[in-house]
Image: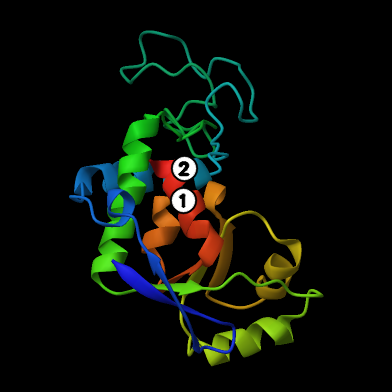
Amino acid sequence: MELSVLNIQGKATGKKVTLPASVFAIEPNEHAVYLDVKQHLANRRQGTHKAKERGEVRGSTRKIRKQKGSGGARFGSIRNPLFKGGGAVFGPRPHTYGFKLNKKVKELARKSALTDQAKNSNISVLEDFNLDAAKTKSFVSILKNLELTNKKVLFVLAEQNKNIYLSSRNLEGIKVLSVGELNTYDILNTNKLVFIESSVKELENTLS
């Protein structure tokens, strides 16, 4: 697939970039995408939930009544889960939700997501640019020129760029990632993927 390279004014530069078929035109694997997105969301969970169990709640440990002869059930102490204020039974404990996923599965998932976005014509290529200073106003003007205002847009850079990142971080729906930070969830959770020209080759080297 060939795409025209645009400049930050939103006009064609006359250059064209070929998106590598090994990354943007594979047979998508939906299960790999599902697993990668599931892992990404699981890793974001804090897992700090906690409920006090029988040994952690306040209350006397005195035996309420004798073990036998009352005709009722046995009770150990006021901390019994059956009483108001008693401990929780098998309450939640802090733990991590993350799980291991093979590197090749994650690569296949990213390629599948990129292929899906390419089929839906949601990919653009922007020539390499830099901002002299971190100014949100400068980035907003680029979005207007590219007709991407009020859209969820993911900009993919070849490497981290502090000025571009700082200029975009206050804008709702806009995300800037380097090729090394690119993940399946962010690829799918956007209306438009904008690759900086040099990032296409870097992505091919990373995923090939």
User: For the C terminus, which image quadrant?
Assistant: top left
Above or below: residue 64 compared with residue 165: above
Q: Amino acid at mark 2?
A: Thr
Q: Which element carries disc 1, helix, strand or loop? A: helix
Above or below: residue 45 compared with residue 149: above
Classed neighbour count for the residue bearing mark 2: other residues with Cα under 10 Å, few (<14), some (14–19), many (≥20):
few
Q: Position of residue 51 (x, y in %)?
A: 54, 36
Above or below: residue 103 compared with residue 167: above
Residue that badge 2 annotates: 206
Q: Residue at x 49, y 39 (%)?
A: 84
Pointers 2 and 1 in contact (C-beta within 8 Å): yes
Disc number placed over residue 37 in the picture, else none:
none
Q: Identify the colour scheme used.
A: rainbow
Q: Position of residue 197 (x, y in %)?
A: 52, 66
CA gap between label 2 and label 1 equals 5 Å
Residue farthest along the front direction in this orientation: 14
Q: Which element carries disc 2, helix, strand or loop? A: helix
User: Between 114 and 171, which is closer to the camera in this rendering?
Assistant: 114
Which corner quadrant of the image does residue 7 belong to?
bottom right
Q: Position of residue 106 (x, y in %)?
A: 37, 39
User: For the N terminus, which image quadrant?
Assistant: bottom left
Res 17 seen here: yes
Residue that badge 1 annotates: 203
Q: Position of residue 105 (x, y in %)?
A: 32, 36
Residue farthest along the left direction in this orientation: 27
Q: Amino acid at mark 1?
A: Leu
Above or below: residue 64 compared with residue 168: above
